[in-house]
Image (spheres, rainbow, N blue to C red):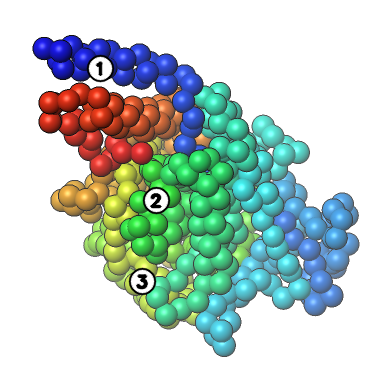
Amino acid sequence: MKGLGLTVAMVVSTAVMWHTCQGNCDLNPLILVPGSGGNQLEARLTDEYEPPSQLCGQKYPLCKERGGWFRLWFRPALLLAPFTQCFAHRMMLYYNPLIDDYDNTPGVETRVPCFGSTRSLLYLDPHFKRATLYMKPLVKALKHIGYVDSETLFGAPYDFRYGLAADGHPSRVGTKFLEDLKDLIEKASISNGGKPVILVSHSLGGLFVLQLLNRNPPSWRKQFIKHFVALSTPWGGAVQESRNLASGYTLRAPLVDPLLVRDQQRSSESNLWLMPSPKVFGGLPLVVTENATYTANDAAQFLNDIGFSEAIDLYKSRIAPLVEQLPAPEVPVTCIFGSGVKTPETLFYDESGFDKQPKIMYGDGDGTVNMVSLAALQSEWADLKNQSLKTVRIQGASHLSMLRDEKGVKRVVEEIKDILDFIQMGHIIQHLQFQLAGDIHGVTDKIFVHPSMRP
């Protein structure tokens, strides 16, 4: 009875500790990995640069920072047709078969500002905050629960034009980003007392994070990763990407001809990565013309017929092996995405061909990514015993709602708080286990702590 009384007293004490901990315990470090267009890019021109027109010469733009650096993405001027050509030319990537890798337009140097901080993730252009809002509401909500930028809260922006490639093929820029992200994870953990990190990605960022996790050994993941929260992730690509490659897409900007940016969009390594994958889309009709119907299994023929035949071998050798599987990282994963928003599902082109915008049949998704892609992990990992997966659907939430709208941000933060509460409960139960083991003589049964709750 004495042992039982002591046990009850310690359980009550634990409950008090738990209540107190919810407001006062240290936070696990958290790293935000943005989506494709959510990264800022800066550029400068060297003497090697050959502009496509006089307007795009060395003097444009007039306002530059020290060293000749200027904002490349995003700047509102690119929405004006004369400047769209300058933007597209400077944003182009070129595949070099001699090194089997991509590089910038000759004479254009680029950099990603503020790696490690969330500052460059708040807006696409801080001079136009309302029009280019990105992660500011989510960052603000995280700070409200105690996170501090560059101390417990970090950002990992990257050059979204570049992607990754299958084994045996270099991808210098994308691989360097994974190395930098790994280093940031380790430093964030060490600077926070060895606590493992919570990774929160948006869109394309989730594909990079999954690759990072699966390219590192289980021992590293166990030490440094507590949870992976993936927002609006296109696990199997998106039909919208087929439109980008076929006809160009300007995010509905009224003053820009999509054909002005089509070549630039085709040149981006990451856009091939985001094509609908056969594994997820299978034989669904994605693009329909007068003479053909294309599924994800017809990627090579589709690339040829839209006039982008140079990408066929690149897709087959660098991308197809990369998207054949979605291996589980064996760390807890939470997928949060919107549903019930009309999303391009099938594109219809008439006799005018691919130089005109298609008619669209819509289906379910978040407005950008199709539901079959957003929810792909549910079926892919359903029978895996060593993979914890939680999915959260938010009805009516668009691709960006998780970051900007009150309903989406609130739900994301609730999930993060649940993860933090789960971690803290694990600490408390372990503390109680040690006390029971050391203080109660004659009581041999110990409290079992599930591995996922251990700190």
- Residue at image point 37% right, 18% down: 17
Q: How far is mark 3 from mark 1, CA to CA? A: 54 Å
Specify the farthest residue to the front.
441
- The residue type indicated by label 3 comes to Ala
Give the label, 3 or 1, closer to the camera: 1
Give percent across and percent down for residue 312. Answer: 43, 78
Q: Element under label 2?
A: helix
The reply to whether discs 3 and 2 touch (Cβ–Cβ < 8 Å) is: no
The reply to whether discs 3 and 1 touch (Cβ–Cβ < 8 Å) is: no
The numbered dot on residue 223 is 2
Quadrant of the snapshot with the C terminus? top left
Q: Element under label 1?
A: helix
Q: Element under label 3?
A: helix
The reply to whether residue 162 is in sight is no
Give percent across and percent down for residue 425. Answer: 33, 27
Task: Judge from the rendering whether residue 211 lies leftward or rightward of residue 116; answer left or right.
Answer: left
**Label 3 crowd bin: few (<14), some (14–19), many (20+), radius 10 Å:** many
Q: How far is mark 3 from mark 2, CA to CA? A: 31 Å
Quadrant of the snapshot with the N terminus? top left
The numbered dot on residue 11 is 1
- The residue type indicated by label 2 comes to Gln
- The residue type indicated by label 1 comes to Val
Give the camera-side residue of 396 and 101: 101
Task: Judge from the rendering whether residue 432 lies leftward or rightward of residue 165; answer left or right.
Answer: left
Give the label, 3 or 2, closer to the camera: 2
Task: Judge from the rendering whether residue 353 lies leftward or rightward of residue 69; answer left or right.
Answer: left
Specify the farthest residue to the bottom.
98
Q: How far is mark 2 from mark 1, CA to CA? A: 29 Å
Residue for badge 3: 320
- Residue at image point 47% right, 44% down: 194
Give percent across and percent down for residue 2. Answer: 15, 13
